[in-house]
């Protein structure tokens, strides 16, 4: 599995999604905001799956090179546009559609993104062939913070993989909820020169270890350079096999807690 993942991901720049292998879908958050997404299904039963959360100011296309590679290796993926981003900018109201744009967001609007993720998770869990007990979440930058925060309140998330998180990004805090994740598999990837994310990541894992929740001896991968978010995967040699090999093992329940 590791070799297949590596070969698929090192060719990210050449990835093209063929017609029929991915499709656009829409879900509705509990506050009536429409959330646009792209679903990358797999042709198997009992398959693992992940929800993909993009960085601040980007959209689900941030995963367009990575999601097809996961799909080809048996991991279904659902990449969403968080509210105020991409095509997720319309809320239905009694007075008609209301425009939603992250440029005018207040702190609570970022917290409300958890409703977007919940709607996506519920939709994914109901898809044919998906194992509801093997759904993970992957996030970058703001998406990383949201992934951690959402996992703290949804115990059905099986594994968490995040790139370039912070202790707080747009008022989405992680240090106050990190111990609520419990002993579920967690892995963080950061760049050595991204000092803010590196220090934040070390602090989060320190809190996790103090609580006796670390599933592995080392839950942090630090790569050289200053790349952030998904660029850590697409721009760092050898990183795909490390992080997505880990994700495959985590979703299969193959990680063993340290003694």
Image (spheres, rainbow, N blue to C red):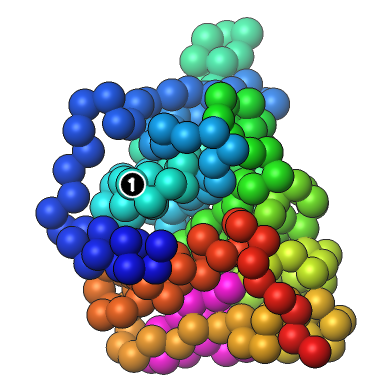
Up the image or down, 141 lies above or below 205; here it is above
Residue that numbered label 1 is attached to: 72
In the picture, which quadrant includes the N terminus?
A: bottom left
The picture quadrant where one finds residue 132 is top right
* Point 33% across, 68% down: residue: 3
Q: Residue furthest left?
A: 14
Q: Tell me if residue 159 can be seen.
A: no
In front of the other: 3 or 118: 3
Q: Residue furthest right?
A: 211
Residue 135, horizontal then vertical, whole percent: 62, 47
Up the image or down, 247 lies above or below 15; here it is below
Span highlighted in magenta in the image:
187-202
In front of the other: 165 or 79: 79
Up the image or down, 47 lies above or below 126; here it is below
Residue 26, horizontal then vertical, whole percent: 48, 23
* Point 63% across, 8% down: residue: 94
In front of the other: 166 or 250: 250
- Within-10-Å neighbours for mark 1: few <14, some 14–19, many 20+: some
Residue 85, horizontal then vertical, whole percent: 42, 41
In the picture, which quadrant includes the C terminus?
A: bottom right
In front of the other: 162 or 40: 40
Up the image or down, 166 lies above or below 127; here it is below
Magenta span has 198? yes
* Number of marks in the rendered image: 1
Q: Tell me if residue 180 can be seen.
A: yes
* Point 67% across, 26% down: residue: 31
Q: Secondary structure at mark 1?
A: helix
Magenta span has 99? no
- Tell whether 259 sits left or right of 60: right
* Point 56% across, 15% down: residue: 92
């Amino acid at each position: 599995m590791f070799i297949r993942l590596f070969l698929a991901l090192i060719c990210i720049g050449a990835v093209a999604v063929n017609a029929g292998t991915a499709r656009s879908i829409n879900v509705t958050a509990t506050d009536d905001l429409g959330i646009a997404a792209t679903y990358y299904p797999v042709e198997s039963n009992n398959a693992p799956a992940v929800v993909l959360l993009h960085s601040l100011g980007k959209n689900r296309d941030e995963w367009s090179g990575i999601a097809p590679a996961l799909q080809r290796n048996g991991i279904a993926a659902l990449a969403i546009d968080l509210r105020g981003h991409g095509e997720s900018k319309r809320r239905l109201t009694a007075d008609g559609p209301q425009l939603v744009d992250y440029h005018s967001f207040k702190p609570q609007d970022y917290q409300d993104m958890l409703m977007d993720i919940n709607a996506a998770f519920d939709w994914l869990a109901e898809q044919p062939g998906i194992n509801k007990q093997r759904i993970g979440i992957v996030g970058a930058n703001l998406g990383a913070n949201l992934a951690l925060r959402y996992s703290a309140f949804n115990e059905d998330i099986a594994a968490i993989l995040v790139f370039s998180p912070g202790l707080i990004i747009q008022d989405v805090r992680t240090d106050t909820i990190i111990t609520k994740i419990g002993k579920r598999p967690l892995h963080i990837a950061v760049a050595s020169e991204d000092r803010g994310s590196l220090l934040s990541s070390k602090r989060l894992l320190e809190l996790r270890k103090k609580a006796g929740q670390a599933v592995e001896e080392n839950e942090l991968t630090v790569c050289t350079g200053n790349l952030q978010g998904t660029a850590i995967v697409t721009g760092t040699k050898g990183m795909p096999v490390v992080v997505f090999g880990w994700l495959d093992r985590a979703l299969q329940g193959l990680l063993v807690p340290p003694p």
